[in-house]
């Protein structure tokens, strides 16, 4: 009789878990949450990013029928960790920060890349102060070069590779590197002569000039990179499959200019993990330790 009671109790407990009252319910809730946490890169001040992307919040909420919370972390590494720990459901990463995430979170699923000028690629620029006498990458030798976040692609990885491959300049040896956090901070550091040169995203630089934040008479572009795969949208692969498909469709169908403008995008196209192998190769060339980023 005791054995029968024990078996019955175990069957009850298993049924309770599967039905959603225990661990099964927790997993089920995470797979199709009533509120989606959507993270955006802190490539400008968090307050600015959140304010500018209110149209995105409303668009996603209406299209997906869910509450949307826009999240902007303090830096790239904290965004990666938040995604790893399932504190973020969908996120807009830079190419390098995505590669860093994928190394630590194998089930991270990239699904859409930003389209600019008809292509899912973008460029970085190296800028210099107008009065510094710097007119080429070679001229940065012996100077201070400002970068954004260590995990930034266009505000660290790409310009650093440009200096190495095109001018044979190595950070810490031929020039002093200075990390200032965000793309706009790089441009301001150069404009205020806190650094003689800097690297950042070309679309962000052009936006800063357009808004009047940066004076083109004080800051000039001295080099542009070749095109690289653009910023990817990434989601947790543990989200319910039907929700994943809805999220993909919502981004592929996005045409609203008010939503796209703050993202500096014309739209979004399908993307795969292998498209970012070029970034992984660049990391190897520069001998960057991803574990330290």
Image (cartoon, rainbow, N blue to C red):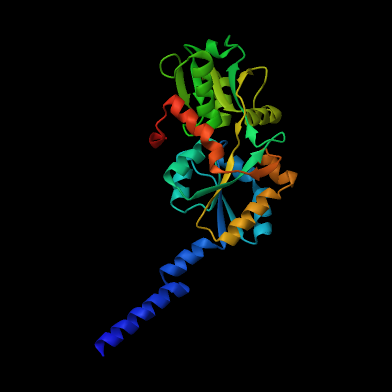
Q: Position of residue 15 (x, y in %)?
A: 42, 77
Give the quadrant of the N terminus: bottom left
* Quadrant of the rendering where the C terminus is positioned: top left
Q: Residue furthest top?
A: 133
| Residue 112: quadrant of the picture | top right
Which percent across, then down, holds residue 126? 58, 21
Residue at the image point whose x is 71% and y is 50% from the top: 253
Say how many tags the image has.
0
Q: Position of residue 59 (x, y in %)?
A: 68, 53
Question: Outermost residue, front direction?
Answer: 274
* 248 is higher (above) or lower (below) than 169: below
In this view, 147 is above or below 57: above
**Apparent side of residue 229 relative to residue 55 in the rendered image (left or right):** left
Q: Give percent across and percent down for residue 42.
A: 54, 39
Residue 158 location, quadrant: top right
Q: Is residue 180 visible?
A: no
Question: In the displayed structure, does residue 288 sit left or right of residue 3?
Answer: right
Hey, which residue is sitting farthest left in the picture? 2
Q: Nearer the viewer, residue 195 or 59?
A: 59
Residue at the (65%, 59%) spot, across then down: 64
Whether residue 119 is visible to the viewer of this picture, yes or no, is yes
Q: Classify residue 229 as left or right of residue 284.
A: right
Of residues 262 and 169, the one nearer the viewer is: 169
- Residue closest to the eye, 184 or 278: 278
Nearer to the camera, 193 or 261: 261
């Amino acid at each position: 009789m005791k054995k029968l009671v024990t078996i019955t109790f175990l069957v009850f407990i298993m049924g309770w878990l599967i039905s959603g009252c225990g661990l099964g319910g927790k997993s089920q809730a995470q797979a199709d949450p009533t509120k989606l946490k959507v993270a955006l890169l802190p490539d400008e001040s968090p307050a600015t990013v959140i304010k500018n992307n209110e149209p995105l919040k409303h668009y996603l909420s209406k299209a997906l029928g869910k509450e949307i919370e826009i999240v902007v972390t303090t830096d790239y590494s904290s965004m990666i960790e938040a995604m790893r720990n399932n504190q973020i459901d969908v996120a807009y990463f830079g190419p390098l920060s995505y590669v860093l995430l994928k190394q630590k979170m194998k089930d991270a699923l990239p699904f859409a890349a930003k389209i600019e000028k008809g292509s899912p690629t973008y460029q970085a620029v190296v800028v210099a102060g107008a009065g510094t006498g710097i007119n080429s990458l070679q001229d940065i030798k012996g100077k201070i070069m400002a970068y954004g976040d260590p995990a930034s692609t266009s505000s660290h990885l790409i310009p650093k590779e440009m200096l190495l491959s095109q001018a044979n300049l190595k950070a810490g040896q031929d020039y002093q590197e200075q990390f200032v956090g965000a793309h706009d901070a790089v441009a301001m550091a150069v404009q205020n002569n806190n650094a003689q040169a800097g690297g950042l995203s070309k679309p962000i630089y052009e936006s800063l000039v357009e808004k009047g934040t940066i004076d083109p008479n004080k800051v000039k572009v001295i080099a542009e990179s070749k095109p690289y795969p653009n910023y990817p949208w990434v989601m947790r692969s543990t989200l319910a499959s039907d929700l994943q498909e809805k999220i993909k469709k919502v981004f592929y169908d996005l045409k609203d200019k008010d939503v796209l403008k703050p993202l500096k995008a014309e739209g979004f196209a399908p993307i795969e993990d292998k498209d970012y192998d070029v970034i992984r190769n660049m990391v190897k060339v520069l001998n960057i330790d991803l574990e330290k980023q």
